Amino acid sequence: MSSENVRELRDLDALRAVASPARLEILELLREHRVLTASRCAELLSTTAKSCSYHLHVLARSKLVEQVSTQDRRERPWRLTYDVAETAPLGDEEFREATDEVVRVSAHHTYQAILRFIAARHELPGHWLQATTLTSRVAMFTAEELQEWAEAVEDLTRRHVAKASSSTMPERRRVRLVTYGFPDDRSPATAQGLEPPDGDRP
């Protein structure tokens, strides 16, 4: 059983707090650096400390981040209050819309990261380029088989992340791990889009 602190986003304020590209960036930075001041956050994101402070306080109101007590009262660092955040089961229409917005913003955020990687991947050292993967596979699953696959991948990912978090290897760098698994029924319109132009037919 995982010892991670899983936070379910069960209220609208928390969902709306997360549905922001800027705040997703800040949450990722806190996962990477563990603790950050608003000033350091601003340096990493090339923005202002005032902007980072605003977003951090929005996240704090939903108890997604908290300030760390220090002797230096000029600027306290922030940290995450959870290890993993998950959307809760769908509720009423307003909750469903807020959850969908989180999914849309998160997917777009990840898509932009993938495009950045593709554009710059040949600048990576050879061993890093060889280690990277962008894989897509189609399979015929039942809902139970899909869930079993997802849980196995999540368990494997968490174990590797936990192991890496205790490493002090100097070669470590930020890595994005992405997993998708969802029903993908091809519609007639999609199939029509696969047809070659008339001039290219055999």
Image: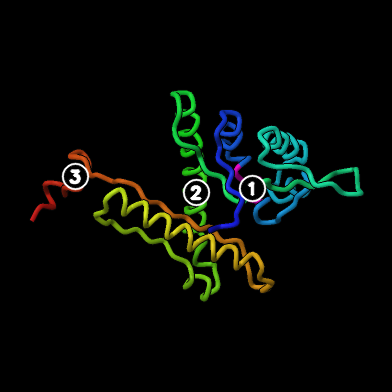
Disc 2 crowd, CA 10 A, few/some/many (<14, 14-19, 20+): some
Q: Is mark 2 on a helix, strand or loop?
A: helix
The residue drawn where x is 64% and y is 46% is 27
Picture coordinates of residue 168, whole percent (x, y): 69, 72
Front disc: 2 or 1: 1
User: Do the numbered discs 1 and 3 sit on residues whose CB atoms are within 8 Å?
Assistant: no
Color encoding of the figure: rainbow
Q: Position of residue 17 (x, y in %)?
A: 61, 34
Residue identified by numbered label 1: 82
Circles 2 and 1, Cβ within 8 Å, touching? The answer is no
- In the image, 185 versus 130, the foreground residue is 185
Disc with the residue nearer the chain's start (2 vs 1): 1
Residue type, mark 2 in image: Thr
Q: Give the range drawn in magenta.
A: 24-29
Disc 3 secondary structure class? helix
Specify the quadrant that holds the C terminus.
bottom left
Mark 1, other Cα within 10 Å: few <14 / some 14–19 / many ≥20: some
What residue would you read off at disc 2?
110
Residue at 62% from the left image edge and 46% from the top image edge: 25
Q: Distance between the residues labelled 2 and 3?
A: 27 Å
Q: Label 3 amino acid?
A: Ala
Q: Nearer the viewer, mark 1 or mark 3?
A: 1
**Residue at 28% across / 56% down in the picture?**
138
Disc 3 marks which residue? 191
Cα separation, mark 1 vs mark 3, equals 43 Å
The image quadrant of residue 7 is top right
**Nearest the camera: 138 or 2?**
2
